[in-house]
Amino acid sequence: MRTFFPIWLDRVLIVLGLGAFVFFSLFFVVSELNDTEAIIETPVSKVQGKADTLQSFAQALIIGSANLRLARPSPEMRYLAPRTVVDPMYSLLVLFSSVIIFIFFWDFSYRKPFTGKALLGLRVGAAFMLIFMIANFFRHDWFSEQVVLLTKGEFEYRKPFPLTSPEGILFIVLIRVCWIFKKGIDLQTDLDLTV
């Protein structure tokens, strides 16, 4: 089969593409962690029986349709609070995922895709996604308590269910792909033994 690029050029393009992915995700993480003027804005909901008015608290402001806004958040809030645009935790997820892809899949071949290295990379990715899901669950739990404290019990933050979040769905997909790759490796081994 004829390839579009020579093998060496194909490898260089893959390394440059993955390197750019790692660089830009690292850039987002560093820029978010160094942002001293971070404005945290996230949707919250009213606790039953409270009046529907614009609320102002000592460290928080409820604007629009129940959006919590923190103009000068504490360092813990800056790093751990969920955000709608660029979330530092998700930036770390992208960074670590790109490093995993760079380490385990930079020499991936479609001629022989079912290798032990690829399966190990998928398993490491699934394990990392599980750790991220657990950390994100506790982060949302912590932030929910902080919203209740900041708004004196008048508003609450509704935590997303872990398996319906993007990382939960990706974790389920990675588990399924790991199973497919394991079956593929077994079939490839049987084929190699019969030949």
Image: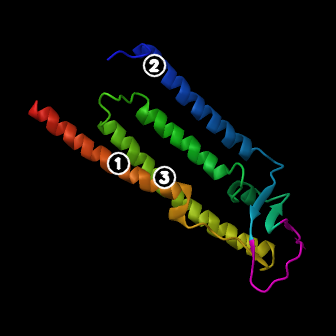
Q: Considering depth in this image, is 30 or 66 the residue closer to the camera?
A: 66
Which quadrant: the N terminus? Answer: top left
Question: Quadrant of the rendered structure where residue 112 is?
Answer: top left
- Tag 3: amino acid: Leu
Whichever of labels 2 and 1 marks the residue nearer the N terminus, that label is 2
Q: Which mark is residue 29?
A: none
Q: In terms of secondary structure, where does tag 1 sit?
A: helix
Whichever of labels 1 and 3 marks the residue nearer the N terminus, that label is 3
Question: Quadrant of the rendered structure where residue 136 is?
Answer: bottom right
Q: Which residue is mark 1?
A: 178
**Residue shown at 78% from the left, 57% from the top:** 40
Left or right: 78 as drawn, with respect to 130:
right
Q: Residues within 10 Å of mark 3 (few under 14, many from 20)?
A: some
Query: What is the x, y in percent for residue 45?
Result: 74, 73
Q: Residues within 10 Å of mark 1 (few under 14, many from 20)?
A: many
Q: In terms of secondary structure, where does tag 2 sit?
A: helix
What is the chief secondary structure element of the magenta stretch?
loop
Q: Considering depth in this image, is 161 or 32 the residue closer to the camera?
A: 161
Left or right: 150 as drawn, with respect to 79:
right
Q: In terms of secondary structure, where does tag 3 sit?
A: helix
Q: Considering depth in this image, is 146 or 54 the residue closer to the camera?
A: 54
Query: What is the x, y in percent for residue 147?
Result: 75, 71
Q: Which mark is residue 10?
A: 2
Q: Which mark is residue 170?
A: 3
Magenta highlight range: 45-64
Magenta stretch: residue 53 in it? yes
